[in-house]
Amino acid sequence: MSDQEGPDDYVLASGTEADLDAVCAIERLSSPSPWPRQAFVDELARPWARLEVLRHPATGRVAAFCNYWLVADELHILNVAVLPEERRRGHAARLLRHILEQAARGKVRVLSLEVRVSNLAAANLYRKFGFREVGLRPKYYADSGEDALLMDLEPPT
Ligand SMILES: CC(C)(COP(=O)(O)OP(=O)(O)OC[C@H]1O[C@@H](n2cnc3c(N)ncnc32)[C@H](O)[C@@H]1OP(=O)(O)O)[C@@H](O)C(=O)NCCC(=O)NCCS
């Protein structure tokens, strides 16, 4: 990021195939088991799947993305990831606010997600937005055998 730009300069937009190089680069820098590009291509074709990016309008740079499923009255968050040098600037919070707006618009009854038990930054992010820990999936992650923490949020009606 140059001195002239800040997190507010990024614009939230629906992700397209043209964003996938950037999305996959963020994913590789963010996850011990990054999704392959084809997984994102497949998501773009699913009517119930959403990919959102924070893109700089002038440079086209993508700082962060999230993807989630909206099925009936449930919203399941699959990924929220931010370029390492763009972290702690509010990008993930902005994506979460957008997800909660979408949930309110779609009359979603419950939002859910899984997070690695060691991922304190992500768990804190979700807690900040009202998610509660509701269970544990033992050895959920095949790469490390780590447990997944299940979190959910029932938005106010
Ligand atoms: C988790 C992640 C998405 C947070 O993104 P971010 O843009 O840095 O988060 P924000 O700046 O919007 O911070 C929002 C809140 O998240 C929490 N948080 C974010 N980073 C944190 C950290 N390193 N340690 C503790 N809490 C953290 C805080 O509660 C923070 O609120 P605060 O700034 O008022 O303290 C980012 O660290 C990331 O991309 N990690 C790798 C990918 C990942 O683990 N994704 C989640 C998979 S489920």
Image: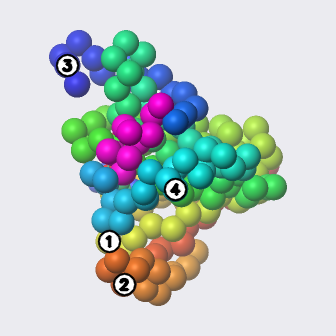
Q: CA distance from mark 2 to mark 3?
A: 40 Å
Report helix, strand or loop for mark 3. Answer: loop
Determine if the magenta segment contains residue 19: yes
Q: Amino acid at mark 2?
A: Gly
Mark 3 = which residue?
2
Q: CA distance from mark 2 to mark 4?
A: 22 Å
Q: Residue at x 37, y 12 (%)?
A: 58
Q: Nearer the viewer, residue 35 or 78?
A: 35
Q: Earlier in the sequence, mark 3 or mark 1?
A: 3
Q: Are marks 3 and 1 in contact (CB under 8 Å)?
A: no
Q: How busy is the neighbourhood of tag 1: few (under 14 within 10 Å), some, or many (20 plus)?
A: few
Q: Earlier in the sequence, mark 1 or mark 2?
A: 1
Report helix, strand or loop for mark 1. Answer: loop
Instruction: Give the quadrant of residue 52.
Output: top right
Q: Residue at x 52, y 56 (%)?
A: 39
Q: Nearer the viewer, residue 109 or 32?
A: 32
Mark 1 = which residue?
118
Mark 4 = which residue?
39
Q: Which mark is residue 145?
A: 2
Residue mark closest to the camera, 3 vs 4: 4
Report x, y in % for residue 78. 53, 57
The stretch in magenta equals 18-27
Q: Nearer the viewer, residue 59 or 39?
A: 39
Report x, y in % for residue 148. 46, 76
Q: Amino acid at mark 4?
A: Ala
Residue mark closest to the camera, 2 vs 4: 4
Q: Horizontally, is 83 left or right of 91 in the view?
A: left
Q: Are marks 1 and 2 in contact (CB under 8 Å)?
A: no
Report x, y in % for residue 3. 18, 16
| Figure quadrant of the N terminus | top left
